[in-house]
Amino acid sequence: MNRHQQYLTPKGMKQLEEELAHLKSDRRQEVVAKITESHDAGGVEDNAEYEEAKNELALVEARISEIENVLERGVVADKSMVEKGVIGFGSSVDVQDRTKRRRKYQIVGSAEVAPLDGKISIESPVGKALVGHRVGDVVEVETPSGVNKLTVTRVR
């Protein structure tokens, strides 16, 4: 993977584009209106609402910049780029650990990571360990608590 490129799934690219459109069209105007209202209501000195609204606008602008940067470097990569049955970018994977606990992961780029939803980075220890493997393979993953062995049970 090229470090300058940001790999995204088609769904991840669409979500970022939608978030950017929302931030630019709706959210930014909402915060600017808050700034205007709080300024008109109490000036700029010792006005907590005004300061809070200005900080909120800074956060919105930072997120807009972050998304634009990701999209500028964004490359849509999907499962068709990977051999069928082999874990790669965009793959959804079911694994079982040595305690027979089952987990589902989707291998994504860093901009789409959502661990609670099972979306893990291709650059994470688990993501790196799984890439290139197939159903039935036992994969060793180095974790802070030691080596964990995962058996690949399904690749989609």
Image (cartoon, rainbow, N blue to C red):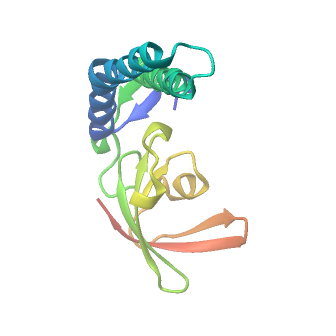
Q: Position of residue 10 (x, y in %)?
A: 27, 36
Which residue is drawn at the image coordinates 52% and 20% (left, top)? 54
Query: Relative to residue 125, is residue 50 drawn left or right?
Result: left
Which residue is drawn at the image coordinates 57% and 23% (left, top)? 47
Q: Position of residue 113 (x, y in %)?
A: 46, 47
Which residue is drawn at the image coordinates 29% and 53% (left, top)? 84
Residue furthest out toward the front: 42
From the viewer's side, name the closer residue of 6 and 67: 67
Residue 121 lies, with reference to residue 93, above or below; the image says: above
> In terms of image quadrants, where is residue 15?
top left
Residue 116 lies, with reference to residue 80, above or below; the image says: below
From the viewer's side, name the closer residue of 56 and 40: 40
Q: Position of residue 95 (x, y in %)?
A: 43, 71
Which residue is drawn at the image coordinates 38% and 26% (left, top)? 75
- Count of marks overlaid on the render: 0
Residue furthest out toward the bottom: 99
From the viewer's side, name the closer residue of 44 and 85: 44
Q: Position of residue 68 (x, y in %)?
A: 42, 19
From the viewer's side, name the closer residue of 61 and 78: 61
Quadrant holding the C terminus: bottom left
Residue 102 lies, with reference to residue 24, above or below; the image says: below
